[in-house]
Image: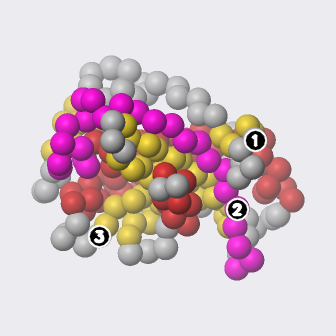
Amino acid sequence: MPRWCSGSASLFYTEKATVRICVGVQMKEMRRLFKNIHGESIDEIKHTLDVLKANPGTKVYVGTDSQKKRKSIEYAVVIAYRYGHRGCHFIYSKWNVSRKGYGRGDDLIIKRLTEEIQTSIEVAERLKEGSISVYQIDLDLNGNPKWKSNKLVQMGVGWARGLGYNVAIKPEELVAVKAANQLVNK
C-alpha cells in the first residue's frame, strides 16, 4: 500500500501500465514544511496569500520532482509564483525516502512518478482549502511514448483534471517542476 494511503489501495489500469493508487478513501494529511530560497521556514498559505495580495494577477503553479540517490529518493515540491513576463519565485519542501520497498527499474520509476503526482495534488488541494486558486499543476511526465513516464500520463493528467486543475506535461514549459528539478539535483 502506498505510504500516503490511509486505507486499501486499488489498481488503476492504463493501456501501458498498472499503477496502485489510493481510490475512494481518505488520504493522510501530510503537512509539509515549506522554506523560501534562503532556507527560512514559512507557512505556504500565508506566504501565498501575501504574494497574491502584493502582486495581483500572479499565477500559482505546483510541481514535484524526485531524484534517486544511492540509498534514498530525494523529493522536492515547489509552489511557484509567476508574475506575468517579469519572472517568478518559489517556495519549496524537500525530503528523503528510503529506496527500500520501491523496487527497481520500471517499478521504481512508476512509484516515484506516482508519488510526485500525489504530492503535487496534495499541495494544490491544501492551497485550495486556503482559498488559493492554483493556476496549474506541472507533472514531470512526457507525452512522447518513447519515455517511460508516458505510461502515467493518462492517470496523472486525468486525476488532476478530475479535481479541476489545469495540467501541463512535457514538452510544455513546467515552471514548478523545473525549480523542483534544480533542488533535487544540487
Query: Which quadrant of the view contains residue 44?
Result: top right
Label 1 sits on residue: 40
Dot 2 crowding, Cα within 10 Å, few <14, some 14–19, many 20+: some
* Residue found at the very far top of the displayed protein: 7
Q: Is residue 165 visible?
A: no
Query: Which quadrant of the view contains residue 108?
Result: top left
Residue 42 sits above or below residue 80 on the image: above
Report how far apart the C-alphas of labels 1 and 2 lie in the structure: 14 Å
The kind of residue on which mark 1 rests is Glu
Left or right: residue 111 compared with residue 35: left
Instruction: Count up the numbered dots.
Output: 3
x then y, percent, for residue 125: 55, 41
Q: Residue at x 63, y 34 (%)?
A: 33
Label 3 sits on residue: 143
Ranked by sequence position, the earlier of labels 2 and 3 is 2
Nearer to us: label 1 or label 2? 1
Instruction: Kindly state the secondary structure of the residue where label 1 is placed.
Output: loop
The kind of residue on which mark 2 rests is His
Mark 2 and mark 3 residues within 8 Å of each other at the beta carbon? no
Dot 1 crowding, Cα within 10 Å, few <14, some 14–19, many 20+: few
Label 2 sits on residue: 89
Left or right: residue 63 compared with residue 84: left
Numbered range of the magenta stretch? 85-110
